[in-house]
Amino acid sequence: MSSTIAYIIIGISVLFILGIKLLASPKTARLGNLVAAGGMLIALISLHQPNGDYVWSQGWTFNYTLIVIGTLIGLVIGAIGAYSVKMTAMPQMVALFNGLGGGAAALVASLEFINIRSDAELTAVIAVPMLFATLIGSLSFSGSVIAYLKLEGKFEKPMTFPGQNLFNGLILVVILGLAIFLGGHVNTPAFIGLFVLALFFGVAMVMPIGGADMPVVISLLNSFTGLAVAADGFAIHNNAMIVAGTLVGSSGTLLTLLMCHAMNRPVSNVLFGAFGSGGAAAGGAAGDLAGKTVKPIQADEVAVLLAYAQQVVIVPGYGMAVAQAQHQVRELSDELGKRGVEVRFAIHPVAGRMPGHMNVLLAEANVPYDQLCEMEAINPTMDRVDVCLVIGANDVVNPAAREDKSSPIYGMPIIDADHAKTVIVMKRSMAAGFAGIENLLFYKDNTRMLFGDAKASLNALVAQVKAS
């Protein structure tokens, strides 16, 4: 029986790993989801008791009925969410679903701990994973709820107060103290206190973080959920949970580090820096812009530039998502393509509000995947681009990251939009981006500003290009 279980676990692991691999490309992402879901289905039907007997070999038991009911409810909720949530609200749904996963992991560990009858039954092998899953899962749940609210625009700016990091540190010390105490004692009130404090700590940790840093936060909390699930697996002796949780935890951690690298900021700065609180200053950039003005342009003039260009690069940002203008972007790209214009999309790793946000929006609008280019691939060719159309992106195209050593974003890799022959920036106003600093790109000699709502401006551009 043990060899059979080992083969099943190996098969499940392969399916999970293959599923994650297929998720690396939009072309195979749907298949990747199905493969990973197939692995989870096998994990469910191959559940076994500590004595080695499979759950389904015990007959139609009440517990197995609950598994089926829970699976069906999850399928219905997932389907409703997938079909009803707009693509622009996908980051919110990802944050919420991730939080539910963390909460579920915390509840599993909590129930297992509460079922321990006496201190004699409590060993380090049992206590450590249960307490770890409770702490990390609760933190992930409450933190993800706050991330969801920030993405909804309820409070995008960091909410801080003097001594906040010290206050959060004290809470963490109390939590760790309770965890050490519970490692050798079965005490329900103390455990409930740990659970509640962990929930509060998740709120306290995410509240000081700005809304534009939510991609990093979501990725980090996703890794926390994975680690909580893996700990649950150790606590209840479920190898499939260990494998799945470890894969999610490790991949989420790597993604978090890669995104922080893309912003040239350490994780500690994201979590404790209150970046975007409005205190950032443009530093030397303000002096450099003295006497300079922006140069507005009209839609008909932009249409002529686009229609007669040979190479056009479009840089999408959060403003495009807010305006829900991805379909108009694709229509403009198609019209230019009919005229022999080569159109590419430059995707910055942290553009938007979740990892891959721009990719998801453009895929939803049926933009061909081979037109999407990563920052490292597009930058060496930007000096040969006739027109660079920036739609709602700000800090990720700000030359201050290269030119102004006093800027808070100095050193952050950006898309070199200013290297194009002509840059068209589409914005509602001259409002600063999340970093709260002036964008040097707006004042470059080769930059023109097309003010207005992105969707309305793009509709006008499409109409003008068709008429040209």
Image (tube, helix red, strand yellow):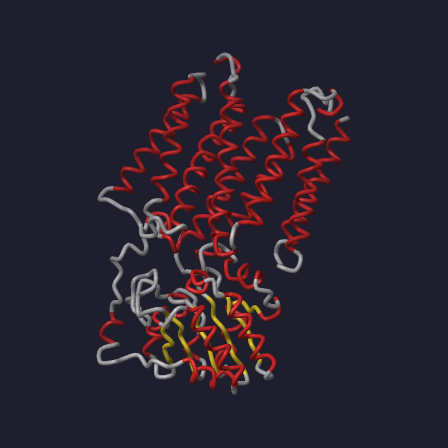
Left or right of residue 296, residue 119 in this image: right
Location of residue 166 in the rendering, given as x and y in whole percent from the top left corner: 27, 39
Q: Nearer the viewer, residue 214 or 282?
A: 214
Residue at 52 percent of width and 27 percent of height: 109
Q: Nearer the viewer, residue 239 or 32?
A: 32
Q: Nearer the viewer, residue 157 or 276?
A: 157
Location of residue 216 in the rendering, given as x and y in whole percent from the top left corner: 44, 52
Q: In the picture, residue 71 is in which quadrant? A: top right
Residue at 39 percent of width and 57 percent of height: 265
Left or right of residue 342, residue 57 in this image: right
In this view, 40 is above or below 456: above
In this view, 221 is above or below 467: above
Q: In the picture, residue 55 is in which quadrant? A: top right
Q: Nearer the viewer, residue 417 or 366?
A: 366
How many marks are shown on the rendered structure? Answer: 0
In this view, 392 is above or below 33: below
Location of residue 299 in the rendering, given as x and y in whole percent from the top left corner: 42, 80
Location of residue 92 in the rendering, given as x and y in whole percent from the top left corner: 46, 49
Q: Quadrant of the N terminus?
A: top right
